[in-house]
Image: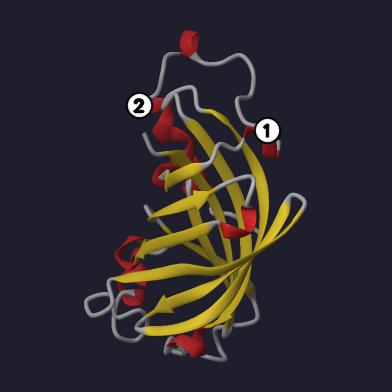
Amino acid sequence: MRHILPLLLFAVAVPIVSGPSLAQMPTTVPGAPDPLRVVAGTYTIDPAHTQILWQVNHMGFSLFDGAFAEPTGSLVIDPKRPTAAALNVEIPIGKIVTTSAKLNEHLLTADFFDAAKFPTATFRSTRVEVSGQTAKIHGDLTLKGVTKPVVLATTFIGAGAHPMTKGTAIGFRATTAIKRSDFSLGYGVPIVGDTVTLTINAAFDQQK
């Protein structure tokens, strides 16, 4: 997945501005892909370090990436019962980001997301299948008022004590693919591809 460089720079810069001084930074990586580090409880999305990235084929010439910024949501998880995990995510459509300001504006119109009428997209998990460090999270994606089942192919990235929040943090990476036309978003098909690849880099902080 080709990420947009400005988005990555933004995601990295935010904690540097508001985080601890260099002298206070941990000397070892606090997170690791060890399930024993996962603490049961309810977690909330860290919006500054969660990326919802999408990619479409643009006219057969190139692959074009964009993102939704500042999602919110929760994860309820118990490492002893991982298949009982519950994930809920809300995605603010108005926070869509591409490399073109004019395209950002057009995507918010009725041609595409119609953000004035449908300001939020949601994902609600319905079932979880776990296999080692990976899982399939089945759920319902609601976009532009249309709800369809999707499956997130998910990889556990790591967990551990967060040096700034002092609680447990946990992170995953998930991928899936949807068709724009299934969600009344078929403007420009087939000149702009119907299939959209989604990549979610999700970070969660334990609720206090």
Report whether 152 appears left or right of 95.
Answer: right
Q: Residue at x 33, y 60 (%)?
A: 95
Q: Quadrant of the C terminus?
A: top left
Determine contact: label 1, label 2, CB under 8 Å.
no
The disc label shown at residue 32, or none: 1
Q: Secondary structure at mark 2?
A: helix
Spot the residue most to the top: 23
Spot occupied by residue 3 in the image (x, y as percentages of width and height):
58, 54
Q: Is residue 51 left or right of residue 208?
A: right
Please name which of the two marks, 1 or 2, marks the residue nearer to the observer: 1
Q: Residue 156 placed where, x, y %? A: 66, 48
Query: What amino acid is labelled 1 in the image?
Result: Ala
Q: Quadrant of residue 122?
A: bottom left
Q: Secondary structure at mark 1?
A: loop
Quarter-of-image position of residue 137: bottom right
**Residue visible at 68% across and 39% down in the picture:** 35
Neighbour tally class for label 2: few under 14, some 14-19, many 20 plus, Cα within 10 Å: few
Colour setup of the view: secondary structure
Q: Is residue 57 visible?
A: no
**Does 41 sit above or below residue 153?**
above
Residue ID at (62%, 31%): 31
**Residue position marked by numbered label 2 in the rendering:** 18
Task: Indicate left or right for 7 with 81 as reference.
Answer: left
Q: Amino acid at mark 2?
A: Ser
Q: Residue placed at 43% from the left, 24% from the top?
A: 164
